[in-house]
């Protein structure tokens, strides 16, 4: 039972916090571990400083694979053996940095707030992918949309669209997925009624197929 829980935690693990503020945080991991957990627009969570009963909920808005002197030398080389490239990608601990925008927080009893958290996560705190149930519960309301649309440091329109698509795919039923996208589209229309060009762009990104 304990082993099963640990396996689930490992499947959800995104990385560990490097630095943080109430507006967002950055976490790191190895580039060899990059997969769907690090997708643009994915919902992630981490405990706030000194209180595991409150968890921050955020959206991944940037993923950066860091370079180093060896990588720079290999890039500049005229020819690189395929085995060398494979070894560098699979065996070296090249760091990857993931940037997250905070869009809410959640108490242990399930109460959700669509606003900035009271405190940021502590350094080295585990960052995990939100479970399907948490994503569905968090996105029942669209109160976090303004936090994304008004965030100056992120590609806000694309991020909101990616988050909506990500949440939509948590629904198993096609009709529920369609209804969710329509509801989000109407909420965005209210938020961006003053900027029709921007509204058209965002709606195009989430339009149901």
Image (cartoon, rainbow, N blue to C red):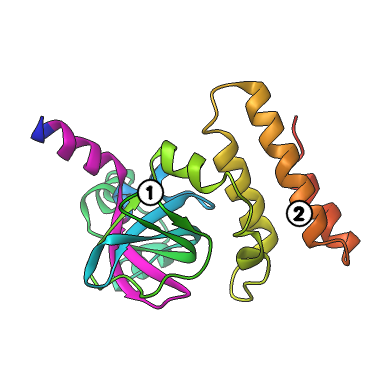
Q: Position of residue 122 (x, y in %)?
A: 26, 73
Q: What residue is at 56 percent from the left and 33 percent from the top?
A: 169
Crowd around label 2: few <14 · some 14–19 · many ≥20 (10 Å): many
Q: Is residue 180 above or below residue 93?
A: above
Closer to the N terminus: mark 2 or mark 1? 1
Would you say residue 74 sits in the magenta stretch? no
Q: Is residue 113 above or below residue 139?
A: below
Residue 48 lies left or right of residue 160; in this view the side is left
Q: Indicate the quadrant containing the N terminus: top left, top right, bottom left or bottom right.
A: top left
Q: Is residue 198 visible from the viewing direction of this image?
A: yes
Residue linked to disc 2: 188
Q: What residue is at 54 percent from the left and 23 percent from the top?
A: 172
Q: Quadrant of residue 77?
A: bottom left
- Secondary structure at badge 2 equals helix
Q: Is residue 103 above or below residue 111?
A: below
Q: What residue is at 30 percent from the left and 53 percent from the top?
A: 108
Which residue occupies the foreground of this view, 37 or 49?
49
Q: Position of residue 44 (x, y in %)?
A: 41, 53
Return the mark for residue 53.
Answer: none
Which residue occupies the foreground of this view, 69 or 53?
53
Q: Indicate the quadrant containing the C terminus: top left, top right, bottom left or bottom right.
A: top right
Q: Is residue 80 above or below residue 134?
A: below
- Secondary structure at badge 1 equals loop
Residue 15 lies left or right of residue 188; in this view the side is left
Q: Is residue 95 visible from the viewing direction of this image?
A: no
Residue 198 lies left or right of residue 206; in this view the side is right
Would you say residue 6 sits in the magenta stretch? yes
Residue linked to disc 1: 110
Q: What residue is at 17 percent from the left and 36 percent from the top?
A: 5
Q: Position of residue 179 (x, y in %)?
A: 70, 32
The residue stretch that appears in magenta: 4-30
């Amino acid at each position: 039972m304990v082993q099963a829980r640990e396996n689930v935690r490992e499947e959800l693990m995104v990385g560990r916090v490097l630095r943080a503020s109430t507006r967002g945080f950055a976490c790191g991991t190895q580039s060899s571990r990059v997969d769907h957990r690090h997708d643009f627009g994915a919902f992630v969570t981490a405990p706030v400083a000194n209180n595991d009963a409150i968890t921050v909920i955020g959206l991944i808005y940037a993923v950066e694979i860091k370079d180093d002197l060896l990588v720079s030398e290999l890039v500049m080389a005229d020819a690189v053996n395929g085995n060398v490239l494979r070894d560098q990608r699979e065996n070296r601990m090249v760091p990857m940095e993931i940037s997250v925008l905070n869009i809410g927080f959640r108490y242990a009893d399930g109460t959700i707030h669509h606003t900035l958290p009271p405190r940021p996560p502590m350094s080295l705190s585990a960052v995990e992918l939100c479970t399907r149930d948490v994503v569905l519960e968090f996105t029942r309301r669209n109160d976090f949309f303004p936090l994304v649309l008004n965030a100056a440091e992120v590609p806000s329109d694309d991020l909101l669209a990616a988050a909506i698509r990500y949440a939509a795919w948590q629904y198993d039923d096609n009709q529920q997925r369609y209804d969710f996208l329509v509801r989000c589209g109407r909420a965005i229309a209210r938020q961006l009624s003053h900027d029709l060009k921007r509204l058209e762009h965002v709606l195009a990104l989430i339009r149901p197929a």
